[in-house]
Amino acid sequence: MKILRLLAAMLALAAALNAHARGNVPIVNHEAIAATRASGQPATAEQIRNALQLAGASRGWTITPAGNGKALAVLDVRGKHSVSTEITYGPGKYAIKYRDSSNMNYEPGDGAGTIHPKYNMWVQKLIDDTRMQLLKP
């Protein structure tokens, strides 16, 4: 019986440590992301917009134009979590900044605040996929 209690206590401790390890992290806003084509030439604003659209669609992002050189990117995850970012783009570069979120433990604070670590991962994947789209011939 003592062994079962000890095992249960160890499992509870492990769960608590895991929950603590998944605490909020600082929001990373990405400024002046270089956008180049496979040729090494800077991508045009239209090429960047198209690459963002294709990259976003493959990961479930909805990217909507929001004016000249601007877009709004929204990701809904299983109807439970959502994030939105503002994207600005121009010849040879673009930027992605946090805008809003739902059910992501957002906390305002110094700089952009803190959020669940998945947010930064999702945005980084969008950046990586956009880079791959731009490198396609």
Image: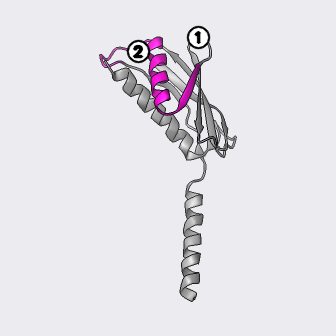
Residue that appears at 34% across and 22% down: 135
Compared with residue 113, is residue 136 higher up or lower down, i.e. above or below?
above
Q: Secondary structure at mark 2?
A: loop
The magenta segment is 37-64
Q: CA distance from mark 2 to mark 1?
A: 16 Å
Residue 27 in magenta stretch: no
- What is the crowding at mark 1: few (fewer than 14 residues within 10 Å), some, or many (at least 20)? few
From the viewer's side, name the closer residue of 19 and 50: 50
Residue that appears at 49% across and 17% down: 49
Q: Secondary structure at mark 1?
A: loop
Please identify the quarter of the rendering in which residue 47 is found. top left
Point out the image quarter for the N terminus.
bottom right
Label disc, if present, on residue 43 of the rendered structure: 2
Compared across the picture, whether 130 is left or right of 95 comes to left
Of labels 2 and 1, earlier in sequence is: 2
The residue labelled by disc 1 is 68
Residue that appears at 56% across and 32% down: 29
User: What's under tag 2, amino acid-wise?
Assistant: Ala
- What is the crowding at mark 2: few (fewer than 14 residues within 10 Å), some, or many (at least 20)? many
Q: Residue furthest front?
A: 78
Coordinates of residue 108 in the picture (x, y in percent):
70, 40
